[in-house]
């Protein structure tokens, strides 16, 4: 028996009382507690890193039908380079200098590109862009318009895959590179 425990019992008996022995902090308890602290720190670090490099978003609206659907959840890489045909989330400014909202679109024009629409086909720098992700039912009105633009440096020209309903660069202009929140990876 431990000396302190024996001493505690002897004093309690001599006084005729029962005093519960206080639990002492031992190395085992400190090791157990430190394990919890380390585990918590690791989990918080993983969550912080995930938040720094990735984002989870919910698609809002039909502008990306048939590729993405309203309410669908998708994963973004925040620190990723953007390529033509990538699906990106951008911050769209609702009013000049005011609030922003996230929108999800497909990158069509890169900085400096000439983007031309003619009879439902897109041309990038006078070469037709293959768009296998488009659905005929979502480009009926798009086939009736023709336009030609030059993408400014440090900007992207984006379109929704559901061209007939999408509010995109045709309506709000090109987006600065800094407006990109992330690139869809799943």
Image: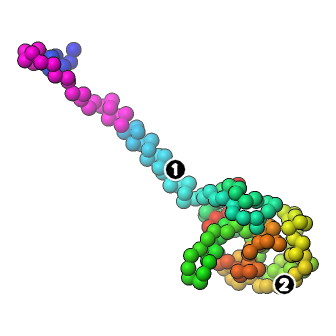
Query: How many labels sit on residues?
Result: 2
Q: Check residue 143 in the rendering and tell me which mark sits there, or answer none.
A: none
Magenta region, residue range: 10-33
Of residues 135 and 110, the one drawn nearer to the viewer in this rendering:
135
Separation of disc 1 and disc 2 at Cα? 47 Å
The image shows residue 100, relative to residue 3, as above or below, that is: below
Q: Is residue 19 magenta?
A: yes
The answer to whether any part of residue 83 appears in the image is: no
Q: Position of residue 18 (x, y in %)?
A: 15, 19
Name the residue located 70 percent from the left edge and 80 percent from the top edge. Answer: 172
Residue at image coords 69%, 63%? 60
Q: Quadrant of residue 87?
A: bottom right
Whether 172 is drawn above or below 162: the answer is below
x, y percent for residue 117: 86, 79
The kind of secondary structure element at disc 1 is helix
Residue pointed to by mark 2? 147
Residue closest to the far right: 119
Query: Which residue lies at the image location 81% right of the left edge and 60% below the top edge?
Result: 66
Q: Nearer the viewer, residue 143 or 11?
A: 143
Is label 1 in contact with label 2 (beta carbons under 8 Å)? no
Viewer-side residue, 67 vs 111: 67
The C terminus, quarter of image? bottom right
Q: Is residue 38 visible?
A: yes
Instruction: Determine whether 146 is above or below 3 in the image.
Output: below
């Amino acid at each position: 028996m431990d000396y302190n425990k024996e001493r505690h019992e002897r004093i309690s008996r001599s006084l005729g009382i029962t005093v519960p022995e206080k639990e002492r902090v031992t190395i085992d308890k400190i090791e157990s507690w430190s394990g919890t602290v380390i585990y918590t720190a690791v989990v918080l670090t993983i969550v912080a890193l995930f938040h720094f490099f990735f984002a989870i978003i919910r698609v809002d609206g039909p502008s990306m039908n048939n590729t993405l659907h309203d309410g669908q959840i998708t994963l973004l890489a925040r620190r990723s380079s953007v390529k033509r045909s990538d699906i990106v989330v951008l911050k769209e400014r609702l009013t000049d200098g005011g609030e922003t909202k996230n929108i999800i679109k497909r990158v069509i024009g890169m900085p400096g590109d000439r983007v031309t629409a003619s009879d439902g086909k897109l041309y990038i720098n006078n070469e037709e862009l293959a768009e296998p992700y488009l659905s005929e039912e979502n480009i009926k009105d798009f086939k009736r318009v023709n336009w030609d633009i030059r993408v400014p440096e440090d900007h992207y020209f984006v379109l929704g895959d559901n061209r007939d309903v999408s509010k995109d660069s045709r309506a709000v202009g090109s987006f600065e590179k800094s407006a990109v929140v992330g690139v869809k990876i799943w």
